[in-house]
Image: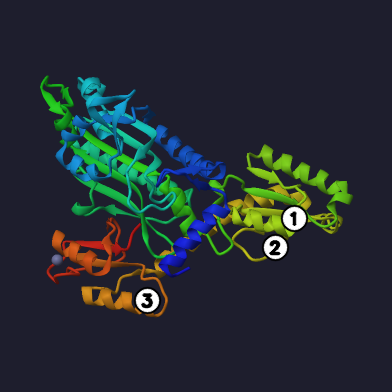
Amino acid sequence: MKNENEFTKWYIDTIQKADLMDYTPVRGCIAFKPDGFEIWEHIQAEMDRRFKETGHRNAYFPMLIPESFFQKEKDHIEGFSPELPWVTEAAGEKLEERLALRPTSETMIGHLYSDWIKSYRDLPVLINQWANVFRWEKKTLPFIRTSEFLWQEGHTAHVDEEEAREETMQMLGIYKEVVEEVLAIPVYDGQKTPSERFAGAVDTYSIEAMMQDGKAVQAGTSHYLGTKFAEAFDIKYLNKQNTHEFVHTTSWGTSTRLIGSVIMVHGDEQGLVLPPRIAPTQVVLIPVGPWKKNPEIIEKLDEVFAQLKAKGIRVRLDDSDQSPGFKFNEWELKGVPVRIELGPRDLEKNQALLKARDEDEKVAVDLAEIVGKIEEELETMQKRLFDKAVAFREKHSHTHVDTLAQLEQHIEASDKNDEIPGWVLAGWCGDDDCEENVKNETKFTTRNIPFNPPATKSTCINCGKEAKHTVWFGRAY
Ligand SMILES: [Zn+2]
């Protein structure tokens, strides 16, 4: 799975065999099948709870945005115009003004906030939206990059820079927590370089995750927008001294590419491996041996099923007439964390066999203790997957590269040994041209300037001058 093409093929095969999605006749637009959508629902629930605990509320804004709104913030339109789909006609008539299918909602929300916010008493405004957005992509990959995708976008307005910056960092922290603790994916948090900033932001921060082919996925971003959108949309408030001031705004988002990241980080040759906290089915119970002639097998499994359900565990009993081998394979493809097998011989010994999706061995568990054992296994598997992903990332995060020549040698050596090049930590002088040159020569782009780099670099990887920043470089989706 190390080779780029093999990995992509494995990924597409895996999501199709696991029945997560289907293609549609509209290029780059996929259908989420129930198992794929349910993974999203669990991610959503974990995020949404944390948003609400920190004082945010959900609202909903229109999908169609007038062209004139985009013209108001110059950087914003420049960044997004190449990817916008437009509605030009409705009810058989040409529209007076074209309407874009939203790529993000800063403009519509800016327009409304200028009306909603009048005084310091109206602040802060802490709103999140769960929605679909459109970015017409040339190269698409299900969940990772699609023309239409699902996401959440937070949009907040504050009295001053300090409060808005605190909000920006708070939300990045929530993203890191959910991605690490729920999706079991370790991330580096840090600041984006100016060329990788969100179009119209003053500062963009991100969490970056490493996939099993060594490429990066930007798993979430949080932006401090300063007063740029406030000035473009005239969002002013009357302060306590009775003078008008522009608000400071933020926006932050995570999307259904998190589903793709989970698959690319944890999956294996047998298919999906899902962290228990987001698995649509956490436990599958499978009768084995001559179970149809022994009705007490199903009776016992029904009993375990009811006990697990009462504990809030998502459990399925597979009593279809397929062979056990077929069932094992099918539930493995779907990445179900725990499988329980029970046959007449097991029942005689008052035990069942437990198989964790990511472990090779089956273990016998006492039927009297089975519910507690399953709960325990779901917890330890969650942690095991995270630790394994951390070890993988550490193995492929390199700190020995200081010059472009060394980076080129590193990539060459990796290719030769059929290894992935992973990421390198390198110094950067802050010049856009140096960043651009590294990208052109190696396809390695700046991921972020980590808050806690494992080492500090003193010279720029490209020009050798003094480094202003220590940056993660890697190939990215
Ligand atoms: Zn430089």
Residue pictured at 35% horizontal, 46% vertical: 173
Which of the pair 214/208 is nearer the observer? 214
Residue pictured at 61% horizontal, 46% vertical: 281
What amino acid does circle 3 point to? Asp
Question: In this rendering, does residue 386 appear at all?
Answer: no
Label 3 SS:
helix
Query: In whole angstroms, how far apart are the C-alphas of marks 2 and 3?
Result: 37 Å
What amino acid does circle 1 point to? Glu
Q: How many labels, in total? A: 3
Q: Looking at the image, is mark 2 or mark 1 earlier in the sequence?
A: 1
Which of the pair 323/280 is nearer the observer? 323
> Which of the labelled discs sits on residue 362, or is there none?
2
In the displayed structure image, the side of residue 284 where residue 465 appears, left or right: left
At label 1, counting other C-alpha atoms closer than 10 Å, the crowd grade (few under 14, some 14-19, many 20 or more) is many
The answer to whether the residues at label 2 and label 1 have Cβ atoms under 8 Å apart is yes
Q: Looking at the image, is mark 3 or mark 1 earlier in the sequence?
A: 1
Question: In this rendering, does residue 351 appear at all?
Answer: yes
**Label 1 CB less than 8 angstroms from ligand 1:** no
Residue pictured at 40% horizontal, 46% vertical: 27
In front: label 2 or label 3:
3
Residue pictured at 39% horizontal, 40% vertical: 151
Label 1 SS:
strand
Where's residue 277, x and y in %? 54, 47
The residue pinned by badge 1 equals 341
What amino acid does circle 2 point to? Lys
Q: Work out whether 406 lies above or below 368.
A: below
Where's residue 341, x and y in %? 74, 55
Where's residue 248, x and y in %? 20, 34
Q: Work out whether 151 lies above or below 236.
A: below
The residue pinned by badge 3 equals 415
